[in-house]
Amino acid sequence: MKKEPSKIQIRKSDSKKVVGRKMTGHAKMFYKIGEVSKLTGLESYVLRFWENEFTLLHPRKNDGGQRVYLQKDIELILKIKKMLYEEGYTIAGAKKVLKQFPGQITSDLPLGRIQKELRGILELLH
């Protein structure tokens, strides 16, 4: 006999705190910092550092004070990681771009596209 996943009602005690970890069914709504670390390939201390550096990244905290990340937070972390590690942005540069284009995917940003094209040209010249 298969055990059905328990249904946990999600409620907000205030705008920064949440209770419950899963939506009904199998889709996960909240991720702890260790889970996000594994999903993104980044150490927990890097995620905590980025919270201080990037104002758009602000995971909620549950009643126990643990960070809980939403899917949108993970997507933002992956955008930041790509900008810093693959596209060569500095933290200051990434902050500036994210403030100018807060809802767009990094590869769709004008500056990101231009940098990518220039790197391609440089590779052709070498």
Image (cartoon, helix red, strand yellow):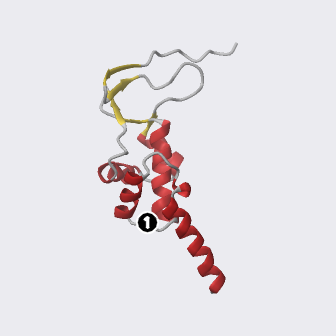
Relative image position of residue 64 (x, y in whole percent) = 31, 28
Figure quadrant of residue 97? bottom left
Instruction: Report the residue at 40% width, 59% height from top.
Output: 94
Relative image position of residue 107 (x, y in whole percent) = 55, 57
Quadrant where the C terminus is found in the figure: bottom right
Q: Secondary structure at mark 1?
A: loop
Horizontal side of residue 77 vs 51, given as left or right: right
Q: Nearer the viewer, residue 115 or 24?
A: 115
Relative image position of residue 71 (x, y in whole percent) = 50, 37
Give the amino acid at mark 1.
Tyr
Q: Which residue position holds label 1? A: 89
In the image, residue 14 above or below residue 116: above
Instruction: Report the residue at 45% width, 55% height from top.
Output: 80
Outermost residue on the right side: it is 1
Instruction: Report the residue at 36% width, 62% height from top.
Output: 91
Instruction: Report the residue at 56% width, 74% height from top.
Output: 118
